[in-house]
Amino acid sequence: MIEGFVNSQGALGTVLVLLAGIGLLIASTEKLISYLARASLRMRLSLFALAIVFTGFEFDDTVLALVFSAGGMEGAALGTALGTGLAITGVTLAAAAMVEPFPVNLPPDYVALFVLGPLLVIPIAVTGTLTLGYGALLVAFFLGTFGYLIVRESQRNIPVFRDTEIGQALRGDGGHEAVDELEPIPEERLLGGLADSGAVWLGLSVFALVAIVFAAMLLEGGSEAVTESFGIEGTVLGATFLTVILTFEDIMLTIEPVRRGLPEIGVGNVIGSVLFSVTGNIGIVAFFGDVAVSPSVLTFHLPAMIVVTALAGYFLASGRIERWHGYTLGGLYVAYWVIALVVYSGVPIGK
């Protein structure tokens, strides 16, 4: 429906819709960051756990996968899921590292689960078929992993990212003075006494997330219409444009929290999004029937994703994400594009 509306607006209208989607996404991301930080402080909850829940679930990708699958395009939905998982590390995490190096404080089991996700796709690539049964296992793994991370965070006296402002405020060992206030926002004045309620900020976070999903869907419909209108669809320029636009949501949800000193949200988005893309999202595709998997997934696309994800996991386990980490991940992603174009005669689209 959105894509049909965008296509009916003409070239200029399409560009305006695309710009409106970008503006809404930026504004909604800013609000989500502010709301989650306040919910974390007021409710004494781990901000990393909240980020996993609110940003790890790729609702717009789920909608896109359902549309593709219901229309008999399960292969496209599968490719979208794999492409998203690779772009999260090769574009999103890489860009955040290039913009602002930041500390990371993840337990080894969190990193291990992050690296394990793409490995679960190996049986699908080897057999050449995604079945309903295996899809159900992937969804179960996704739900179990997210549940495990949330429970682990709720039981930790010292949350991850303990050296950040929010982390120090939530520490249970009394090692730092609690930080009770963040930079004021207009909503606090409007809410009055309700501003002290974590549940209120959690509810506002839901509204901000809905706006982000809607903005992302505007971008998905608008970007394809723009490439068609300007005759660059199917070209390297068109693929580059689509990848930048369609990963913009995750880029904003990673870079902006890091820039504002809240890397918990950015890293939570990276870990949650990768795990969801290669487990939950692929599993959802299987609910519509068995899917034939191209041999190139086993020989090229999946190995590339495993290598990039493992390297990202190693960087996350090092304790600090540096700029050269970003350049390395970004360089590998560009190399992936070049090989895909030259050897496989196709340019991978991130989402």
Image (cartoon, rainbow, N blue to C red):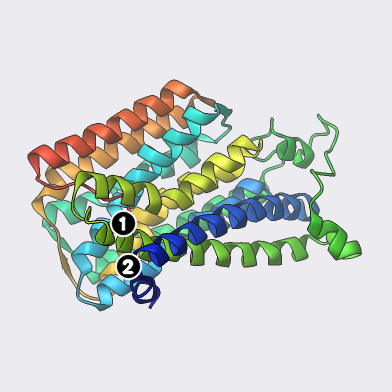
User: SS for tag 2?
Assistant: helix
Residue 167, by quadrant, is top right
Marks 1 and 2, Cα distance to the nearest angstrom?
8 Å
Mark 1 surroundings within 10 Å by alpha-carbon count, few (fewer than 14), some (14 through 19), many (20 or more): many
Quarter the N terminus occupies: bottom left
Give the image location of residue 161, x and y in percent.
Answer: 64, 35
Q: Is residue 196 something that shows in the picture?
A: no
Q: Position of residue 164 (x, y in %)?
A: 69, 33
What residue does disc 1 label?
A: 81
Q: Which residue lies at the image location 69% right of the left edge and 30% below the top edge?
A: 163
Judge from the rendering whether residue 219 lies leftward or rightward of residue 227; answer left or right: right
Q: Amino acid at mark 1?
A: Ala
Q: Residues within 10 Å of mark 2 (few under 14, many from 20)?
A: many
Of all residues, the one furthest to the right in this rendering is 193
Q: Amino acid at mark 2?
A: Ala
Is 193 above or below relative to 311? below
Q: Are marks 1 and 2 in contact (CB under 8 Å)?
A: yes
Of 215 and 9, nearer the camera is 9
Number of callouts: 2
Q: Please tell me which of labels 1 and 2 falls first in the chain.
A: 2
Q: Whole-percent x and y of residue 45?
A: 71, 51
Q: Is residue 251 left or right of residue 105?
A: left
Residue labelled with disc 2: 65
Picture coordinates of residue 21, whole percent (x, y):
49, 60
Q: Secondary structure at mark 1?
A: helix
